Structures are given as structure tokens and as C-alpha cells.
Image (cartoon, rainbow, N blue to C red):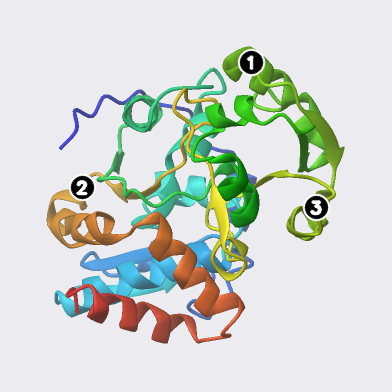
Amino acid sequence: MFTQRRTRIALATAAALGTALAVSGCASSDPLAAETADAGTIVVGSQSYYSNEIIAEIYAQALENAGFTVDRQFDIGQRDAYMPELESGAITLFPEYTGNLAQWLDSSITDGTADEVYDALVSALPDNLTALDYSSATDQDSYTVTRAFADEWDLTSIADLANVTDPLTLGGPAELADRPYGPTGLKSTYGIDIGFSATGDTTVEDLLAGTINVANIYTADPAIQTDDLVTLTDPKGLLLPSNVVPIVNSDVAPDIEDVINAISAKLTPEGLIALNVQSTVDQENTADIAAQWLSDNGLS
């Protein structure tokens, strides 16, 4: 689907390799069992993040349904822990996010459309890793407002905020004040003057209370669904797209790409939020959530 251009990056240190799977929770009792898995086994990993683990479980069940043997190495941690394992081949397949991974590999990648960020990612990947098709589902920074505020000012995109005559206050983590996509970026890219409040973990609560009227939250936050929030589109690409993308060992990619790409084609932004609601609000089991999603989408 896409032209894949990759450059090699250096392997991580031996220390990182030794500790990479030490915190694996939903996996084999041997934290490095993936390194000795049978050649025909697909080792699926996940971050220590409920949303990422749900996607990984969807991958795992779909592969099992297609006749593959799967070893789950979930709850590994963050990129410093699992990327060396992907590069070494100890993990075969991992759900990732285009913009965040691209910037982790190459800090000069700061903007672009979803396609451009994907192309930058595949260029930055080491030669033995392949990015399969990315989905429309994202888990990235967003600017989000309440439904009432969106209706009052006819807001669908960030650009529409320029038409709001009431004072605007943006809420988010403290570091957002200095991020290129924060208040200065809103001014330089969209011409929007906006105040800032460091709301941290209470950003959604402050938005609902009206102490801020624009919130910086992740696009897959369950509150978007449960509190009927409106995520504003970003036509000028101020916020780096981070679409869900499967990263796979290049030798195995031809064998599993049809199965995994079919998942990416069905995974939508609204669908990912709904999965997260099932996990965090409804407290459903990850395996059950994944099985139901595959059934609902005709992939079981």
C-alpha cells in the first residue's frame, strides 16, 4: 500500500535488552521466552497501557483464528524496553502510533499529514522492521471542547476557534505551555489568541466545569464518548498524527499482513474510544473485548 523506505538505527544497549520484558504481566512465566519461541510462533507484544493491550489482543486472536501460533508478551512497558526486543526479533508484532514512534526514532519529525508522518516513520525504521497499514484510529494530542460549546459557536475544526469572541482558555499538562503545538502554535498556525491553564490530571473535569473551554486530551480518551465531547479537526496539521500502526518483523510481514491489515481497515477513532470505554468504564475483560470486536467486524 505504501512505499517503504527505511534506514538503520543502532541497536539498544545490552542492559536494555536484558530488562526489556522483566515487567511483562500477561505473558509467559519466562520473561525472555519470546527469544526461544518456535520459529513458527508469532510473538505479540503490548505497552503497559490498557488501550494498547486491547489492540494487541485483537491482533493475537485474529492470528490464532487464521491458524497461527501466538505467544503473548503484554504489559512490557514503554519504548525503551520493547523496541530493542522488536529489533532483536524476540517480539514479532507490536501495535504502535505513527507520530509518537516516528519522533522517538527521529526527533526532527515534527509535522505533516497522516500519510507524510507514516512515510517518515517507515524511513526511520530499522531495516528488519516493517510498518503495515495504519488505521484511521488515533491516540494523540487533540483540542477538544464540550458539545454545548461546539454547538454554540459552530465549531468543527481548530480553525473555527478564531470565530469565538468569548475569551478562550486552553487546559492541559503544564509542559503544554512550551510545546510547539501549544498556545504559541495556535497563534502562529491558526491566528488564535488563547490563555493557558495547567490542569494536569483534571483537564476533563475542568472542561466540564467551564473553568477552561478548550482541552488538550488524547483522542482515544473514554471521556470523549462518555461525556459527549467534540474533538476539533486539525486541517493545518498542528498536532502530529499518531495513527495506530502495526510494527512487525520484516521476515514475517508477508505471512501476516493480510490478517493484520484487515484489522487496521476496520479500526476507527470512534471504535477505539468505545473499546477503551469497555475497559475502563464497563470493566470488561481484555480478551472478551477483543473477541467481541472481531466478531462485530466480521473478522472472527
- Residue at figure coordinates x 53%, y 41% from the top left: 154
Instruction: Label 3: state its secondary structure.
Output: loop
Image coordinates of residue 98 in percent, x first then y, are: 43, 39
Where residue 95 appears, x then y in whole percent? Answer: 41, 55
Q: Residue under circle 1?
A: 191
Q: Provide the residue designation for mark 3.
A: 210
| Labels 2, 3: front one | 3
Which element is circle 1 on? loop
The quarter of the picture where residue 115 lies is top left
Mark 3 Cα-neighbour bin, 10 Å: few <14, some 14–19, many ≥20 = few
Position of 235 with respect to 7 (left or right) is: right
Res 251 label: 2
Q: Quadrant of residue 299?
A: bottom left
Q: CA distance from mark 1 to mark 2?
A: 47 Å
The amino acid beneath tag 1 is Gly
User: Is the Cβ of the residue at disc 1 closer than 8 Å to that at disc 2?
Assistant: no
Of 154 and 220, which appears nearest the observer?
154
Q: Image quadrant for the N terminus?
A: top left
Helix or strand or loop: what does disc 2 sit on? Answer: loop
Please state which of the two labelled residues, at mark 1 or mark 2, is closer to the viewer: 1
Mark 2 / mark 3, whichever is N-terminal? 3
- Relative height, residue 26 to residue 21 (above, below): below
Q: Nearer the viewer, residue 105 or 162?
A: 162
Residue displayed at 20% across by 67% down? 40
